[in-house]
Amino acid sequence: MSEQPAELTSAQVEDYLRKHPEFFHEHLNLLEHMSIPHPTGSAVSLISKQLELFRSRHHDMENQLTALIEIARDNDTSLNRMHKLTLALLDATTLEEAVANLDTVLSEYFLIDFVAVRIIKHNPDTALSNLFIEPDSKDLEPFANELAGNQPKCGRPTMAQARVLFGESAFEVKSCAIIPMAFTELEGILAIGSREEGRFHYSMGNLFLNQMSEIIGTRLITLLQERNP
């Protein structure tokens, strides 16, 4: 077994620094972590004050850099998820496939528990009845504010909203984003829900939610036109 090196004594350190007076010129970064007294009594020397300011600025810059890296990492993750969403929708050739692919990609890549799409349009096809809401349906009344404001709303849905959107799972949804889709060729609602109360909160930004709505709405418009040429 190799012997552990003996710790240096303060006398050895002092002797080394005497023999190498240029040491701190070559290792200025060490000064940030050292406390060096100055023979000024209770007064603070200018050198000490400058060093203190330098340390403070350095730590602030480190914190800012860390925050920027985190933002960049979050943005990369969001862009990758939106790319997956776009590919999944482009891969769909029917409305049924689009809804199925949407549910899969939002669950696997966005980690979303509940997904609902409702197109406000008369639908004679009973096979897709869950996808459509009649324009004069009472089911639209709980969404009057969201549709009028045409802006995503995040938070806990009302029970009336949750029942229309998520059916039997309504009681499980603790927070959700209700995103109106208002296009010339399409009007509807996109909703994404979570079992976590804080997942979608009122102070969330709308940028990615609006982009998600535009991507989904654009693909649904194309598929609707192909379905009813």
Image (cartoon, rainbow, N blue to C red):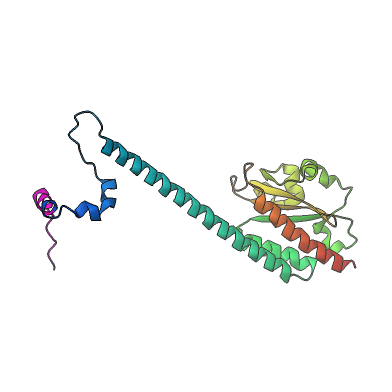
Residue 43 percent location from the top left of the image = 24, 29
- Identify which residue, 191 or 183, lies in the foreground: 183
Task: Identify the residue at image location x=74%, y=60%.
Answer: 216
Residue 142 percent location from the top left of the image = 79, 42
Q: Which residues are magenta?
A: 3-16
- Left or right position of 208 against 14: right
Residue 14 on the magenta span: yes
Residue 54 percent location from the top left of the image = 34, 43
Task: Identify the residue at image location x=67%, y=63%.
Answer: 85
- Identify which residue, 216 or 47, lies in the foreground: 47
The number of discs equals 0
Quadrant (top left/top right/bottom left/bottom right) for the C terminus = bottom right
Task: Identify the residue at image location x=27%, y=51%.
Answer: 28
Q: Is residue 128 visible?
A: yes
Task: Identify the residue at image location x=19%, y=36%.
Answer: 38
Residue 122 percent location from the top left of the image = 89, 56
Q: Is residue 192 visible?
A: no
- Left or right position of 24 against 145: left
- Identify which residue, 168 or 38, lies in the foreground: 38
The answer to which quarter of the image holds residue 57 is top left
Quadrant (top left/top right/bottom left/bottom right) for the N terminus = bottom left
Residue 45 on the magenta span: no
